[in-house]
Image: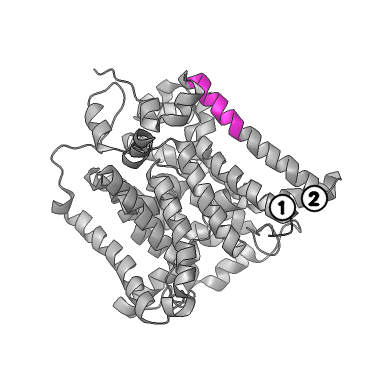
Amino acid sequence: MKYFVSTLHRKQWPFWLGGLFVGLAEIVFYYHYDMFIVVTTGLAQMFAVTEVNLFGVDWVARIYEPGIYWFIIFAIVGARLAGVAEKDSRDWVHYDGGMLTLAFIGGFLFSFGTRLAGGCTTHHFLGGIPSMSIASWVVLITGVPFAFLAFKVVTVLGKGGYLRHQETHCVSCEQEGANYNYNPGYKKGYKPWKNPVHIALSLFLLAFLLVPLYYGLTTDIAGSFSQIGWSEIIWLAVPGVLLGVGIAKTGLGTECSVMAPESAFTSQDFYRRNGVPDCTYKMFRGMLPLQGLMVAIVTLNLFIMASWMWGDGSIPNASGEAGLYWGHFLGGPLLAMGAVLMIGCEVRTYARLGLGYSTALAALPGFYLGYLPYTLYKDTVDNIAFGEGLTDYITVAEWAADKLGGTEVTWAAVYSLAMISILVFTFVAARKFLSVRMRELLVKNTDELVFVASKN
């Protein structure tokens, strides 16, 4: 047991365990707030505090009240704690200017996409899909082709080697020169604190965190200590830390999770021709990211279903009053492209900020600028994205009960069984492709499952 605890503390985890931590974070949040985790409005409020108090402008603050969202703070803290436990901050990972530019563009696209889609991929994939949201499925389905478009852009520009689940220094050293496991991020002698771009981006992050933190502790801005007290801060801190640790220990992200099934129809040679490392192909082909996502989805879905059926909670609405808008069709592609270009969805980016990844640092100012087309032209954007509702149904179960017969409870149970079936499929696919026993699949982390020892 002591060895097991030590291993969990010092090493990376398998995706399923990270997904369980994310699912538990969602449950804690839902239990207290009767809603799944929401983050993008809180992010805008924190940007509003910084812009008003440091620069005297109200580009974001004209729409979003300046405030602090403790969940984001603690998600970053949780990821940092995971890095400290492993003694491996990821600021050593080197990204060239081209990849940092793509990450910045990705942050912009993703941020604006959240305004059109009424939430980020965390909102829709980790919250909306467990809640049976029709809109969340639309965001997912419309986004997948554009995720592959962004994947193609990255590879055409020669950055495919950066598309990895997570770097650890010891594995990068061991795998240097290994067949087809390209890793341009591993650069001997690289000193991030001698890189002026890294320094500037790190200062931006500090301003983003410390300014809201100062005003959140000393004034009465939205979400401040004086407004909500320590009890509510703790209720936001617990899921924040759980989620930050779960993602930082695995590299789990919604973007790679929904892209993984396509690998079943793609040859390994395709990945190699595009400069994508073999570890990524094996990770995708083994359905490991999807495994983590489905653990998180099933964990929250079963808790929501139980709470709803017992009358202790409701099914959260991920889509607004009408259930589906044109904005969901427009925002899904932007979310997908942004997540791939950033090498991580929004909450994965928070975890990567905590770990020190430069792409996450570059995406953060892109996030800020991505809010501006919405805050500066809100009426026009709202009219296009949310002007007309497209359905009267919020959930899949509600639609099915009305159109196909039966009760909403029955179709909710069918939906849960479908989610469980997909989860089971991911484990079966991993065992078959990776040729491992179930015990190995449960205890070995992703690096141990996808890397080979052979070298050139």
Labels in figure, total: 2
Q: Secondary structure at mark 2?
A: helix
Amino acid tagged 2:
Glu
Residue 335 percent across, percent down from the top left: 50, 51
What's the amino acid at mark 1?
Answer: Thr
Q: Position of residue 23 (x, y in %)?
A: 53, 48
The residue identified by callout 2 is 408
Task: For label 1, count other residues whose C-alpha is less than 10 Å away and answer few (under 14), some (14-19) or many (20+).
Answer: many
The answer, for residue 306, to whether it is visible in the render is: yes
Overall secondary structure of the magenta section: helix
Q: What residue is shown at x 86% (from left), y 45% (from top)?
A: 405
| Residue closest to the eye, 236 or 210 | 236
Residue 262 belongs to the span the image colors magenta: no
Decide: is 154 above or below 321.
Answer: above
Residue position for label 1: 395
**Residue drawn where x is 35% and y is 50% of the image:** 352
Left or right, 219 with reference to 86: right
Q: State which region is magenta.
A: 423-433
Of the two numbered discs 1 and 2 on the same chain, state the one appearing first in sequence.
Answer: 1
Labels 1 & 2 near each other (Cβ < 8 A): yes
